[in-house]
Amino acid sequence: MRIAICHFSNSGNTKLACRRIARGLPAHEVDLIDMKPGRDGRSSIPTARPDLTAYGLVGFAAFTDWFAPSEFVRRWLLGLPDACGTAAFVFNTYGFASGPTLNIFAAWVRGRGFVVVSGHSLHTPESYPIQIARGLGAQNRPNERQLAAFDRFIDKTELAAERLGRGEPSRPARLPGGPWRRLVPSFSRRRAYRDMGRKYLDGERCTECGVCERLCPYEAIELDPKPGFDEEACFGCWSCYNHCPEHAIYTGRMRDRAFYPGPNEQLREKLG
């Protein structure tokens, strides 16, 4: 069976976890599909969606952004055609807390006509600088128990794929987490921007490399020749702050500290 895993990953934590999922499905042909390429102008919505009709199972993966998947993911999913009952699984990573992310994610995916057959949330290191600065970086996550639960989710997804391959109908899953996750509120999609605040540039440090512009999922940065910030388009994902190689970008709350430019070494070792 062909399986697609569509992922949105700013820090690389989610993408790294998706690679582990793919390796755990050795009997199938698995394609990892990045949601970010192919954006159109200022719309922040990709012009070309992948053709998912050839896949018997489709995974959707993203990180937690204020107790929900990112606004980018919501927009991306809205551009998909109706899946007409195709089986899917949902997966999210989180640093501080997952909250209702998985349930919200599943609702978005079901809204596009998919049947959600499994889902999981994995505790990974925090990429949100404010939480890292507070000492809540979770830099040693996942622990052994969480990693074992992640592997059980992969095994469960493999079993679902085997049933689908035999022609059995999709079985809607009851997602893990208990009622407390559903009681934690999600926040306005602009709340993350307000928490980050306006961005500033240290022009002496900036080398005009374009990393911030290239990695911004909302196309809120444009070089001319140095970065300019479109605050109305920004959703406060901190990608520009975390990935600037010269640490030239800062906010009123954060400067020169608490960066998370990519998966740390312990996470690579655990998920590699």
Image (spheres, helix red, strand yellow):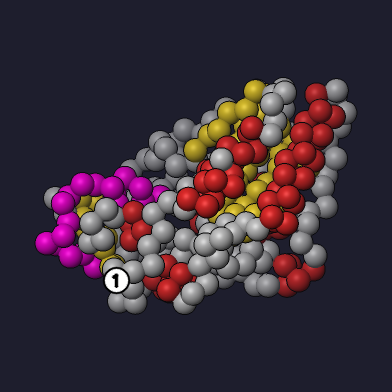
Asked if 52 appears above or below 70 in the picture, the reply is above
- Residue beneath the point at 65% across and 38% down: 21
Left or right of 208, for residue 39: right
9 or 80, which lies in front? Answer: 9
70 or 209, which lies in front? Answer: 209
255 or 231, which lies in front? Answer: 255
124 or 110, which lies in front? Answer: 124
Residue 135 seen: yes
Decide whether residue 207 is among the magenta residues: yes
- Residue beneath the point at 79% across and 40% down: 156
Left or right of 176, for residue 242: left
Q: Position of residue 49 (x, y in %)?
A: 51, 34
Asked if 106 appears above or below 177 in the picture, the reply is above
Residue 82 seen: no
- Residue beneath the point at 24% across and 47% down: 210
Q: Position of residue 136 (x, y in %)?
A: 52, 72
Instruction: State the image quarter where residue 7 is shown.
Output: top right
Q: Residue furthest left?
A: 204
Q: Amino acid at mark 1?
A: Arg
Q: Position of residue 18 (x, y in %)?
A: 59, 41
Please name the residue that numbered disc 1 is placed on.
Answer: 255
Give the structural element (helix, strand or loop) at label 1: loop
Decide whether residue 230 is among the magenta residues: no
Q: Position of residue 65 (x, y in %)?
A: 53, 62
Magenta span: predominant SS is loop
Which quarter of the rendered picture does the C terminus lie within? top right
**Segment colored magenta:** 200-217
Asked if 188 appears above or below 215 in the picture, the reply is below
Which quarter of the rendered picture does the N terminus lie within? top right
- Residue beneath the point at 59% across and 47% down: 270
